[in-house]
Image (cartoon, rainbow, N blue to C red):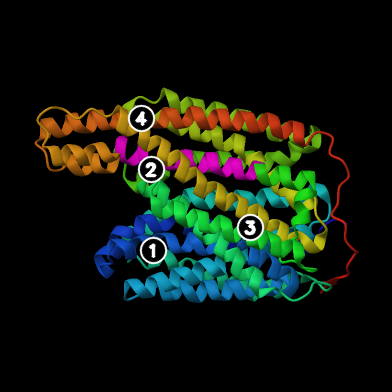
Amino acid sequence: MRAGRREWWGLAVLALPTLLLSLDMSVLHLAVPHLAADLRPSGTELLWIIDIYGFMIAGFLVTMGTLGDRLGRRKLLMIGGAAFGLASIAAAWASSPEMLIAARAVLGIAGATLMPSTLALISNMFQDAKQRGTAIAVWMSCFMGGMVIGPVVGGVLLEHFQWGSVFLMAVPVMVLLLAVAPKLLPEYRDTTAGRLDLASVVLSLGAILPFVYALKEIAKAGVSVVPLVVLAVGVAVGVVFVRRQRALADPMLDLGLFRVRAFSAAASIVLVGALTMGGVFLLVSQYLQMVAGLSAAEAGLWLVPQAGAVVVGSMIAPRLARRWRPEFVLGFGMLIAAGGMVLFTQADGPGGVAFVVVGMSIAGFGMGPQGVLCTEMVVSSVPPQRAGAASAMSETSAEFGIAMGIAVFGSIGTAVYRDQISVPAGVPAETAALATDSMAGALQAASALPAPLAEEVLATAGNAFTAGLHTVAWIGAALVVVFAVAGMIALRKPRRESVAEPVSVLQNS
């Protein structure tokens, strides 16, 4: 059954919160200096202000995807949209660090309702495979584009308004969502699903949150005892969660989904793609600002071509997949992305901006089909009543991938930096130690040195950081090539697979 005008207008409604959600992930970093000057948070409080949003999204995605299947996807989307708007207002006028942390936590929980709900509704609204591919391409383009244009939009707002303005962008969008969703979006839920198992919810949070926290801590401060212990706790709780799901007659997360080859292969490729792009993007953003000397807003502008390339790659993917086999489009796109990453290795100190921008644009174009086609494979490989849970698993794979990429590639870049940097003679020992720790430390150290010595420190630090970028680019390119080939093999001539279950009746209103 082909979608009509109502469904396409409904897609426009679903695209807005998706764009806003990804934009909100990236825009806060620009506002940090402004809110820090106003609220004066401690170092620990500032870290929680930045991180709590991502923690809550990652932790609650699986729960919200499953809850949407039971409660109703439109209903959960509207509840989450209302909560997101109210929390945005609270964050904009937060008068203390504690209030802002609490508001950001609610934003993360509400945000976790938006992604699986929007994607699950798209899978139900667009039954025709061609139309569904185009709809997912639009959805993915909005999500990827929002992450890159966030710094640009945030920079403009912060130049003219107070820091709370970056949060208020959500309010009119959510008001529009609540006003038109009942008219344009149908309701879907699994009428045969049992009650949500609260113990499973607690166990899923106990597995996911420590895992993400440990990866972020390793990315910031390197490997140490505390994050490793936290990681071990998360793994142990995850084992208990898996055992409980296998024992329940109506599990929160049906592990049988992973027996579907298309689902497991696509989710794995999403994980690797997010891992690679998340890690490389971290170093590229730091390179543009700390080595090339661009402001955050200028760096955001230089990354706009990459956003456009992602959109183009995402939008043409469904058309290419109708002409050639989807796994070949996916694989060759990833090979193109690997070629873009190789271009980073040609960047030489501050003068390598052109190579980095062109490389990111090529990589973004190549990864565009990966996001769209893998998402399409995930949602189309499971029964309609499980679309919410499957969508949540796809998004959770992406969240884990980004966190792992930042931790792993960030650690590799830092290790290469520390190995390559050579502090000039005449720099005090304490200042030299600061400069050899990280590129940010080198900038801080240079501010306390005489001009000629500061220039030498920045030059050697810039070269060391660029060497780290080169290493990460080679590793990322190799990883993408391996999974491009593996993906083409794993998804070749897929068998007709489905998860064994009784056919349930969906409530459709």
CA–CA distance in space, label 4 to label 1: 29 Å
> Reading the chain from its start, which is encountered first: label 2 or label 1?
1
Residue displayed at 32% across by 74% down = 96
Residue displayed at 64% across by 67% down = 64
Give the residue number, with chain letter if any, for mark 2.
299
Task: Check the image and report above or below for 360 versus 62.
Answer: above
**Magenta includes 307?**
no
Are there few (<14), some (14-19), or many (20+) residues within 10 Å of tag 4?
A: many
CA–CA distance in space, label 2 to label 3: 42 Å
Give the residue number, with chain letter if any, for mark 3.
239
Q: Which residue type does callout 3 highlight?
A: Val
> Reading the chain from its start, which is encountered first: label 3 or label 1?
1
Left/right placement of residue 53 relative to residue 241 reads left
Q: Which residue type does callout 2 highlight?
A: Ala
Name the secondary structure under disc 2.
helix
**Label for residue 48?**
1
Name the secondary structure under disc 1.
helix
Q: Is residue 377 visible to us here? A: yes
| Residues drawn in magenta | 269-292
> Reading the chain from its start, which is encountered first: label 2 or label 3?
3
Task: Check the image and report above or below for 219 versus 53.
Answer: above
Q: Which residue type does callout 4 highlight?
A: Thr
**Magenta includes 272?**
yes
Left/right placement of residue 481 relative to residue 355 reads right
Residue 199 placement: quadrant = bottom right
CA–CA distance in space, label 2 to label 1: 25 Å
Q: Quadrant of the C terminus?
A: bottom right
Are there few (<14), some (14-19), or many (20+) residues within 10 Å of tag 1?
A: many
